[in-house]
Image (spheres, rainbow, N blue to C red):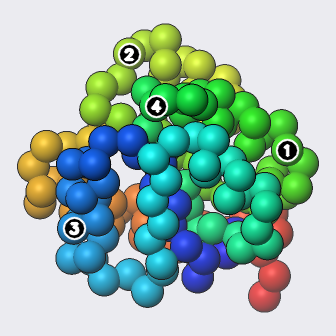
Amino acid sequence: MNKRGPIVIIEDDIDDQEFLGQAFEKLQYPNEIIFFADGEQALQYLTETSIEPFIIFSDINMPKLNGIELRSKVHENEDLRMKSIPFLFFSTAAEQQHVVEAYSKSVQGFFIKPFDFNEMVVMIKNIVEYWQSCVSPNYVK
């Protein structure tokens, strides 16, 4: 896990992108924040670049390649799997079927986006700080 790598956010809703961007801006993490509007764009980035992201936040319902399909492709790709990139779902709702499906694909978390800005900031802070403290299989002292 590359704790200094970019934070990838896959979100097709422009308003949600802006809201998340403001929350990350307030937290002032040194990581670059990279937005993708759909899963296909994100998968292309993940497979065609040598950059190793720190965390992936993905919406579920997106055009072209939805979040569950994207997670499957990331999990099935040995090179991406070995990078130990935390993959989290960040959705406006949590249908039971989606949650079960997500965890069956070894997702590392499923979160419902708060509508309140301060709650969003606290949630993101908790998530990022957890993963900053976590040791991954490719950890080297």
Task: Looking at the picture, tell me which residue is in the foreground, 132 or 77.
Answer: 77
What's the mark number on residue 95?
2
Marks 3 and 2: which is nearer the front? 3
Q: Quadrant of the N terminus?
A: bottom right
Which residue sits furthest right? 78
**Residue indicated by mark 3:** 22
Relative to 137, is 103 above or below? Answer: above
The residue carrying pointer 2 sits among few (fewer than 14), some (14 to 19) or many (20 or more) residues within 10 Å by Cα, namely few
Q: Is residue 41 left or right of residue 130?
A: right
**Disc 2, SS:** loop
- Of labels 1 and 3, earlier in sequence is 3
Q: Tell me if residue 66 can be seen.
A: yes
| Residue 60 visible within the image | no
Question: Which amino acid, by three-letter code, is at mark 4?
Answer: Met
Q: Are marks 3 and 4 in contact (CB under 8 Å)?
A: no
Q: Which residue is mark 1?
A: 77
Q: Residues within 10 Å of mark 3 (few under 14, many from 20)?
A: some
Disc 4 marks which residue? 62
Instruction: Say whether residue 78 is left or right of residue 114.
Output: right
Determine whether, in the image, residue 130 is placed left or right of residue 28. Answer: right
Q: Under tag 1, what secondary structure? A: loop
